Structures are given as structure tokens and as C-alpha cells.
Amino acid sequence: MPKLNAAKRFTKLFLQKTPVHLRNRLINVIFKDMHLRLLLITIVCLLMSYTNRLAAQNRYSVVITEIMSDPAPQIGLPNVEWIEIRNTTNTAINLQNWRVGDASGISGVLPNFLLQPDSIAIICGTTAAASLQQYGRTFAVTSFPSLDNTGEMIFIRNNNGAIIHAVEYNVSWFNNAVKSDGGWTLEMVDVKNPCNGSSNWRASIDPRGGTPGIKNSVDGTNTDQTPPAITRAYAIDNSTLLLSFDEPLDSLSAATAANYSISNGIGAAATAICIAPLFNTVQLTLNNQLQAGTVYTVTASIVSDCVGNRIGAFNTARVGVSSPVAANDVIINELLFNPATDGTDYVELYNRSNKIINLKTLLIANRNTAGSIANMRALTTADQAMFPGEYLVLSADETIVKRQFTATNLSAFLNISSMPSFPDASGNVVITDNGGLIVDELAYDEKWHFALIRNREGVALERIDPNAATQNKDNWYSAAKDVGYGTPSYQNSQFRLDLQVQGDVTVTPEVFSPDNDGTDDLLTISYRFAETGYVMNITVFDAGGRPVKALQRNAICSQQGNFRWDGLNDKFQQLPMGPYVIFTEVFNLQGKVKRFKNQVVLARRQ
């Protein structure tokens, strides 16, 4: 049938384009000469074969439409892994020597088989084929990829090695806690929109758990009208950049160097390469070199996604040459170690340096019962820059954190598989580089929370001053109620930079309200002396002259520093509103003594 259709098209073109007198003469010659008739048939066959080969070379001519990555517990389908493919063209495509693969390997070849237009086939491992053949055309291949339950990149490539379709699925695409636990497939919604990622995939709604060999249960129209966006950029070196986009791109526009420019005098890119298999990453080489310590902006224009949507507002990203991390360049800034019942732990980091840090060089860990660093996890295996002043939130599942807390920067999250555990009572958070340097460490305790919070589940502990010592318990406080008890991805509700005081001892603010609303919850008692070696006692007196809080006893002081008071007495009880006196006594071993009195007002909302 395909050859006959091609012959008809050839004949129609011949009749339309050839003058009548020449056409008649050629017809007489052809039908009188057997050799010419055979030649004509051969030409038609060759044209048809060439058309088939062209179709097989096109991206998305065959697409992966269903993925069974976690078949247990069984719902109704066999307990085996498989994928489903579909021919999206109007031409039969020969699958001979095609392969499937993932980041870790490639399968054996598919057999000589013509996959007809709009038809479906199942691909699986050799031991799974027998149980899947009842559902439709099934191909068993050697070394079938072991599909990761939580997600990975899987692709299909043709006999020439060209990637025809790739999917980087993720367990979050199920959007269903029950189905993501196993036994259900992920199905593509619209095969005409094969490169739109999570928005074009759903958990199967077939009661068997999937639809191998037949039209997907979620099949429908899902037109892509969203332009591509740059998600991040990274400088491999001072003349090579990697740009990541949120979806696959049109290869031609993405590989046009003139479509990219870099600020601060760098100018247009010299070359651009759109990288397989996902085609959502572009490598740029530059005509001019980037300078260390400078943050640049890279801009993309006239770049389109695979269905032709041209990039719009989200077409820029910061980029710069990274520097080696040093101790305290990146600090632990916020910690949720006692999440709500349906929540998850998270750790927020903050880059307080003026460096661009490669997150690929950092790891998160805890300490075991012997006090040794344990459970080390790399933040990411890909190069990713963390710029000065940026926040980063680490968790096992960012979707849970974003659902339970307000996140102002949705891109400031990284999922860490097998996140180290952080006990509810006390524990350790350790950040190291890949050479073993401890970048920052916190030994936390639940007693650091505001004492009047009865239920500490879902309440994050926030760092008050990023420039103060990490291990100072007075530098941590419960996140405010007004922000939902956590501020992942943005400035802490209890943030306060210590003032550069000019006097001996000062207190700020003069009126404070310890009600955990995020505004003036703590009283800061700051000191500054000309020399070190002083010892300090701080006592709080009420308006009647009675001592109500022994805030510090024989505290060894540096040249400058601070202490904080949360408005509670020695029994951790709430004190009444009104005026109080902060009495501070400072002395050293040489017998020098000095005393200070500072009056404050404790207030609360009515």
C-alpha cells in the first residue's frame, strides 16, 4: 500500500507538471519499453524508502507514551517494568536496530518491524515479555534499563544513534501520594505535545494501573502555548557557558549563536550547541573571557521550544566564574527538624560571601552517635551556581515544603534523595565541601525554640544574624507565626543584623514585644569594649526593683558581641507588660569593674 500511494503521488505530479505533448510521448515510450517500466517502479520504491528513512530520523516521530517504573505493589498489571512507544507520523517506521536507554546504559537492539502510523508497541526486558504479550505488540530487548522509581531520564534512539524522544520523568508527576507509591503508570496526555514535561503527563486512571498496548486513559488535547524559559546558567570556565531551559527546544533556533548575548562587554556567543538527549541545555562558547568575581547576565532571544513557542520574559539568567568555597562562605540559615505529621525536614543555606559557589562541590550530612560525620549527601551532581546573597532550601521533597510554607523563590530548592535525618529533640547539621572541609555546622536543640510555643511541630528555627556565630544558641529563634512558622527561600522573619554600637552597653529596641509575630520579638543587649578579657553578668529587674531574670552569669566576653532576652523569667514564664531595667556588670581579673543600667519596655498586642 505505501508503494502504491507513492506511485499515485508521482503520477499526479507527472500529470500536473508535464506539458501535454511531452507527457503523451513519454507515456508511449514507457509503456512500449519493459525496461523503462521497471525503472519507473524502482524509482518509486527508492523514493518511498527514502521517505521512510527521513520520517524515522525526525525527533518525535516515535514517542514514549507510558512508563511503568514501579510495578509494585501490583494493582492489576504484571509486576514488571516497561515503556510504551507510539508512531506519531502518517508513515510506517522500521524499528530495526533501534534502542532504549537511560543515563547508565543502553539496551540491545529492536527487531526488524514496521511500526504502522498511530500504532503502539511495548518494550521491556527479556524476562518480562511473556507476561506483557497479552496486552499487544511487545518487544523484549537485552539490557533493558532499570527504571528508577523516583525518576530519571529515559530515551529512545534510532538505528543511526539519533535521539528521537527522551523523557526525564519524576515521581512528583503522579501528583497522587497513593499512585506514586507503586503499581501505576505515568501516561502522556497529548502525543502532539511530546516535549512539555510534567504538564503533559498524568497518573493512569485505568483501574488496572495502566494501559499497555492501547490508547492512554488520560489521552486528550493539551496544547502547549507556554514559551520556554531559562532556569539557570553556569560557567564551566571563563569562556564556556551552559544554559538550562525548562523544556526541550527547537534545535535550529537553539543552536544559533547570534540568539545569545552576555552583558558587561562580552557580547554575542561565538558558538551554540543544543545538547541531546533532552535538548533543554545549550552550550555556548564566548568570543571574550569572563572575569572572576563579576556577575554577568546572559540573554536568549528568538529561541523556540519544540512546538514553536518563542521565548518571552524569562529569557535571562545570572552567570559567572565560580570560586572555591571557604569556611562560613555558605551558612546554615534555617532548619525545620520537627515537621508536621505530613511534612518533611528542610535546611536552608545562605551564601553570605561575595563569591559564586558551585553547589556541585557541597555536601550535607549529620553526625552519628559516635560523633563522626555520617550520611553525607551531595547537593547536586550537576554544575549549579549559588550567587552572593542567595538562599537554597534542601529537602527530600520540595513540593511538600512549598505546599506547607510560603516560598517566594520557587527555583531556590533542591531535592536530596535519602536526606540525612535530623531528630526532633537535638541533632547536627553539617555542610562540607567535596574535599572534607567543614563549611558550616550546627548542633541544634529543641530548647532553642520560643518557650511558650507548646506544639513545635512544623515550626522552623531561624538564624537571627548571618554574621554571628552559628553555634551561639542566642543567635537562633522560632520563626514567626505571621509567616506560617517558616521562611524557606527568603529572609528570615527573625532576621536582625547586629548594630555597630558606639557606647559601652546598649539595648535595642527600647520597646520590644516577645509574642513571636516576627517584629521586635527579642531584646538585643550589645556591648563593645576597647579590649578583650571581660566577664559579664546581666540581670533583669522589674519596675519594683525585684530581679526576674538572671540572663547571664560569668559570661566571658570578646571585644564586642551581644546577648538576647525573650521576655521570659527564670521559670520560662511570660512576664507582664511594663518597664524593666537591664543591669549589666562587667569586670576582669585585673579588678576593673563597670556597671550599666538600660531601661526597656516589654509590650504585647492587645
Image: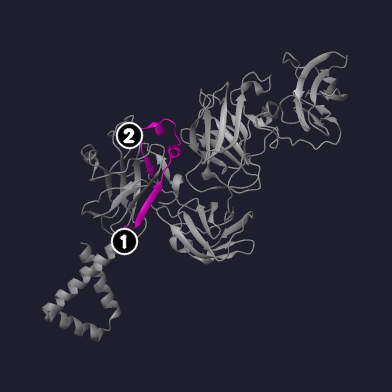
Neighbour tally class for label 2: few under 14, some 14-19, many 20 plus, Cα within 10 Å: many
For badge 2, the amino acid type reads Pro
> Quick check: marks 1 and 2 in contact, CB under 8 Å?
no
Position of the C terminus, as image quadrant, is: top right
Say which label, 1 or 2, has the lower sequence index. 1
User: Which residue range is magenta in the image?
Assistant: 160-188
Q: How many labels does the image show?
A: 2
The CA distance from mark 1 to mark 2 is 33 Å
Position of the N terminus, as image quadrant, is: bottom left
Nearest to the observer: residue 342 or residue 33: 342
Neighbour tally class for label 1: few under 14, some 14-19, many 20 plus, Cα within 10 Å: many
Image depth: mark 1 or mark 2 in front: 2
Query: Is residue 172 one of those drawn in magenta?
Result: yes
SS under mark 2: loop
Residue 490, position in %: x, y?
Answer: 64, 39
Q: Which residue was labeled with disc 2?
A: 71
Q: Which residue was labeled with disc 1?
A: 55
Residue 327, position in %: x, y?
Answer: 62, 39
For badge 1, the amino acid type reads Ala
Query: Is residue 496 one of those drawn in magenta?
Result: no
Position of 521 relative to 43 (above/below): above
